[in-house]
Image (cartoon, helix red, strand yellow):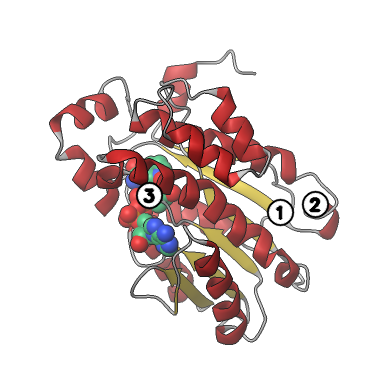
């Protein structure tokens, strides 16, 4: 039994749930955060929900967190409809993740082996617009949300892709800073290809979206991945054994990135 406390957001489903289970089986204390079925029930799309998360974790974990794993996100069926849904993608996948990681950083700073990780994505074949990514990275949530409703963003995948690319860039920029690396906190992301979770099950049931998602996404190692494949990597990245890896976006994608981007990224 370990005395480490892990906060896992998105713990009610998919990769967050698998990660929380792996940690609990290994004897760690896990505080799950989600909209439902969690130790701390909070809506990370909204400022009040983000504050409720921080208050709830302080109460549930006695002010301790040795690691934060931010898995809560929307996609899949959530991508189907309307401007409100697109706004939610940006609010949860980018600003909700930052609220979790930055909001809990003061607790991490008290740990002897503090670690943080989140989930981005494979590099998207669609081109998300730089203005939306820039609004995210500037921390301007309302500007980012306003851009989601403009004509420049017709497609849900473009907005989803922008939320993930902005998050990857934020991890890259933030990890080496004095507040993170300087405080001994490793910060990384995992970039999955298509993983078999409730999120993709709904998405794959919509023929037009299924074609956009599966076309051109080879995963030669084993086709779709399982939530545990990604969970095992998140567990290692946030373990004390990870002493020197930070600022990375590590693809857990069955070889997709190696096929799609080849060897000239180095
Ligand atoms: N499944 C895939 O193929 C895939 C691929 C790449 C990246 N991702 C990303 O991985 C992460 C986890 O996805 P998953 O496939 O496990 O999905 P999932 O739908 O199974 O789980 C997501 C969890 O996040 C929670 N959540 C959503 N909005 C929330 C909110 N406003 N407040 C609190 N909790 C909220 C949901 O309730 C759910 O329990 C997401 O960020 C997703 O974008 C998924």
Q: Secondary structure at mark 3?
A: loop
Q: Position of residue 9 (x, y in %)?
A: 48, 64
Give the number of the mark in front: 3 or 2: 3
In whole angstroms, how far apart are the C-alphas of marks 2 and 1? 6 Å
Seen at 77% across and 68% down, the residue is 109
Q: Which residue is mark 3?
A: 74
Some atom of ligand 1 lies within 8 Å of the CB belonging to the residue at label 3: yes
Mark 1 touching mark 3, by CB under 8 A? no
Seen at 41% across and 21% down, the residue is 126
Seen at 63% across and 43% down, the residue is 140
From this view, report whether residue 153 is shown above or below residue 265.
below
In whole angstroms, how far apart are the C-alphas of marks 3 and 2? 29 Å
In whole angstroms, how far apart are the C-alphas of marks 1 and 3? 25 Å
Image side of residue 177 versus residue 203, left or right: right
The answer to whether residue 238 shows anywhere in this view is no
The tag on residue 77 is none
Assess disc 3: are there few (<14), some (14-19) or many (≥20) residues with their C-alpha within 10 Å of its C-alpha.
some
């Amino acid at each position: 039994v370990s005395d480490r406390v892990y906060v896992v957001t998105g713990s009610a489903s998919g990769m967050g749930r698998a990660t929380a289970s792996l940690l609990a089986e290994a004897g760690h204390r896990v505080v799950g955060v989600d909209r439902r079925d969690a130790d701390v029930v909070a809506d990370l799309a909204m400022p009040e929900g983000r504050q409720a998360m921080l208050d709830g974790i302080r109460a549930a974990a006695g002010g301790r967190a040795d690691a934060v794993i931010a898995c809560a996100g929307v996609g899949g069926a959530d991508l189907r409809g309307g401007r409100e849904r697109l706004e939610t993608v940006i609010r949860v996948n980018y600003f909700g993740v930052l609220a979790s990681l930055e909001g809990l950083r003061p607790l991490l700073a008290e740990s002897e082996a503090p670690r943080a990780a989140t989930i981005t994505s494979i590099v998207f074949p669609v081109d998300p617009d730089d203005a939306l990514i820039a609004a995210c990275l500037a921390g301007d949530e309302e500007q980012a949300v306003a851009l989601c409703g403009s004509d420049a963003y017709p497609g849900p995948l473009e907005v989803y892709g922008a939320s993930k690319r902005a998050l990857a860039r934020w991890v890259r920029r933030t990890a080496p800073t004095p507040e993170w690396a300087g405080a001994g906190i490793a910060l990384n992301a995992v970039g999955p290809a298509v993983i078999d979770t409730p999120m993709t099950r709904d998405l794959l049931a919509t023929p037009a979206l299924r074609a956009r998602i599966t076309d051109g996404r080879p995963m030669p190692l084993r086709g779709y991945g399982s939530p545990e494949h990604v969970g095992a990597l998140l567990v290692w990245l946030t373990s004390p054994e990870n002493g020197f890896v930070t600022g990375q976006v590590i693809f857990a994608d069955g070889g997709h990135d190696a096929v799609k981007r080849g060897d000239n990224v180095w």
